[in-house]
Amino acid sequence: MSEEARDLANKKDGALAKIDFVADQGMGLENVEKSDLALPFLKLLQSGSDETKKKHAKYVEGAEPGMFYNTVTKKLYNGEKGIEVIPVFYKMTYPEWAPFERKEGRPISNDRGPSIMAETKQNERNKDVLKNGNEIIKTANHFVIILGDRPEKALMTMKSTQLKVSRGWNSLMEDQFEIDPKTNKSIQAPTFSRIYRLNSVENSGSIGNWYGYNTTMLKKVDDVGLYQMARDFHNSLKKSQDNLGVQEEEKSNY
């Protein structure tokens, strides 16, 4: 009996002839929606991060300040060596937080929108404060694909001192161009057509020492499958950007 005939006979008996993951792709996840998934954050660890404290419940073995950490895969990356990422989408949000001293782990509101800034006043620490005492912390959200053995989708946020880095990165991305072969004119390249290196760098100031980001453009994306993945990720985020509901992992002074 041929292998094909044997497979057919087994199927008639209700038994599997072989494991076929492709034929069963996505099975078991039919009712899982975006709201049921944890958003992977690419976190830049600081000296006060729970992941670096050996006695803390969130401690991650090997975690040190200056490292990058994926909150879903639990993977650590060497910040000095850096990682390669493809930026696919950007959005500025205006979450409302309780005062830092209350140490609340989640924002009161994920995004009050830019108009809320008109209702704030800067205090002696240059924080944008509402009449109720809560703070609005402008947050630059960069959705990226982390490159490596297996590409990973993630979100990295920049706020406070790192907003300047975010603006610089946006300017760098905006300054990438291609030539349209049909018109021979220069056109702006999609952000996900370029690969960037992210490094962590140590900063110091009146609030102490902390780690920040450094971005460098490396090269163009030359893998069709990777480009398609980045393009699809961009389109899905663009389609749902009004309902992204970015949920911060923790509040930071940096």
Image (cartoon, rainbow, N blue to C red):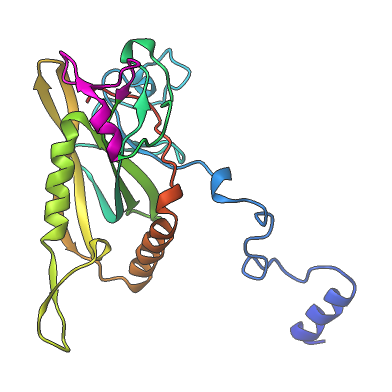
Q: Which residues are magenta?
A: 114-135
Location of residue 100 in the rendering, given as x and y in whole percent from the top left corner: 32, 15
Q: On the image, which quarter does residue 65 sit in? A: top left
Relative to residue 155, is residue 238 depicted above or below? below
Location of residue 31 in the rendering, given as x and y in whole percent from the top left corner: 67, 53
Q: Quadrant of the N terminus?
A: bottom right
- The verdict on residue 134 being magenta is yes
Closer to the camera in the image, 17 or 191 = 191
**How many circles with numbers are drawn on the protein?**
0
Residue 192 is left or right of residue 236, and the answer is: left
Location of residue 34 in the rendering, given as x and y in whole percent from the top left corner: 54, 49
Work out which residue is located at the far right of the displayed protein and give it: 13
Query: Is residue 127 at all visible to an observer of this figure?
Result: no
- The verdict on residue 96 being magenta is no
Query: Is residue 249 at all visible to an observer of this figure?
Result: yes
Location of residue 59 in the rendering, given as x and y in whole percent from the top left corner: 42, 22
Closer to the camera in the image, 95 or 33 = 95
Relative to residue 140, is residue 24 depicted above or below? below
Closer to the camera in the image, 43 or 124 = 124
Residue 254 is left or right of residue 149, and the answer is: left
